[in-house]
């Protein structure tokens, strides 16, 4: 990690403190990179294993995987997790989900030379999802609308006052649904479509948005559940959304957190 600046494809790094709908703050680790300057030698340089599936993929995919994992490592270090955990390999699950070290939840996203990652303690959060998305253009808008939004959602966006363009708002809803998917996947454990959640409110001033589940996904993500997200604009026409869920009452993580609080209170 000390040699990050020496990696030929590296451009810049930042930590962005971002508000969550839970009123907490979280550090989003972002890295900008130049895909054209990436070579597979970056993996060895950073001491990061290159999975076979990535070694066989195209250069663009190798670069986004590499910088996504690098952003995740930085986020883990920033979260104060011990160095051995921070350097641990973040594997690839059967549904492509990142396999985080023990007691850590997190999420990775990448788009057009930007990689972003967030992590949190699994005692504080049951699931977290992040998405960075380039604002749609006239040529990409129809495909995004077709895939991710229904007519009622588009009407709601058109009626929503404020400085954001319709393309920004469409991108935002698409991105929010992807963040929700990533945050909920650890619990739901299966694919669910964009039609499973509907936009219920959007507030460009506060950077908040809510999606309501219109399908029962599992006992945690039930029909009618309201899922709140935060969003912000990054430089260069990119939108970032974050979704985070507290651990489910009665889950192992909650019991662990309350045991640790109990022991702290009693040792004080
Ligand atoms: C999985 C998916 C959300 C990834 O989003 P994307 O815009 O293609 O790509 P991003 O760069 O934002 O995110 C990719 C990262 O998501 C993470 N990811 C992939 N599958 C995941 C899963 N099942 N659960 C959690 N995270 C996952 C990975 O870290 C991946 O990066 P990596 O492969 O380099 O590790 C998307 O491809 C998808 O399948 N969407 C359909 C499901 C959906 O969004 N439904 C909406 C429900 S309301």
Image (cartoon, rainbow, N blue to C red):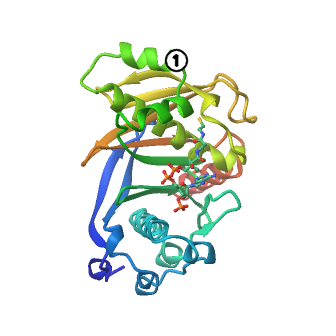
Taking the image as shown, residue 121 lies to the left or right of residue 16, namely right
Q: Which residue is mark 1?
A: 151
Q: Is residue 125 visible?
A: no
Does residue 49 sit above or below 107 in this rendering?
below
Report whether 79 appears left or right of 166.
right
Residue 122 lies, with reference to residue 221, above or below; the image says below
Q: Residue at x 39, y 30 (%)?
A: 208
Name the one closer to the observer, 130 or 120: 130
- Residue at the farthest front position: 139
Residue 104 shown left or right of residue 163 in the figure: right
Foreground of the two, 110 or 189: 110
Location of residue 12 (image quadrant):
bottom left
Q: Residues within 10 Å of mark 1 (few under 14, many from 20)?
A: few
Which residue lies at the image location 70% right of the left edge and 27% below the top edge? Answer: 215
Instruction: Please give the name of the residue rendered at 49% of the width and 80% of the height, measured from the top-left corner.
Output: 48
Q: Position of residue 17 (x, y in %)?
A: 31, 50
| Element at label 1 | helix
Expressed as whole percent of the image width and height from the top left, the position of residue 126 reads: 60, 47
**In front of the other: 129 or 60:** 60
């Amino acid at each position: 990690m000390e040699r990050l600046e020496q990696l030929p494809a590296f451009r810049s790094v930042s930590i962005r403190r971002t508000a969550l709908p839970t009123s907490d703050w979280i550090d989003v680790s972002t890295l900008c990179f130049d895909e054209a300057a990436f070579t597979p030698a970056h993996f060895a340089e950073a001491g990061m294993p290159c999975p076979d599936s990535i070694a066989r993929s195209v250069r663009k995919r190798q670069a986004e995987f590499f910088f996504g994992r690098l952003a995740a490592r930085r986020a883990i270090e920033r979260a104060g997790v011990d160095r051995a955990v921070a350097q641990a390999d973040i594997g690839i699950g059967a549904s492509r989900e990142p396999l985080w070290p023990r007691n850590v939840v997190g999420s990775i996203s990448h788009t057009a030379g930007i990689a972003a990652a967030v992590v949190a303690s699994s005692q504080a959060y049951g699931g977290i999802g992040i998405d960075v998305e380039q604002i749609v253009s006239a040529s990409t808008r129809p495909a995004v609308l077709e895939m991710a939004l229904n007519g009622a959602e588009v009407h709601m966006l058109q009626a929503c006052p404020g400085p954001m363009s319709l393309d920004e708002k469409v991108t935002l809803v698409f991105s929010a649904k992807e963040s929700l998917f990533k945050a909920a996947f650890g619990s739901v454990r299966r694919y669910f479509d964009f039609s499973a959640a509907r936009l219920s409110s959007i507030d460009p001033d506060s950077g908040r948005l809510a999606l309501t589940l219109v399908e029962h996904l599992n006992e945690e993500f039930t029909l009618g559940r309201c899922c709140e997200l935060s969003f912000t604009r990054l430089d260069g026409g990119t939108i970032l959304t974050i979704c985070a869920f507290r651990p489910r009452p009665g889950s192992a993580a909650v019991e662990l957190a309350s045991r640790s609080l109990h022991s702290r209170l009693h040792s004080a």
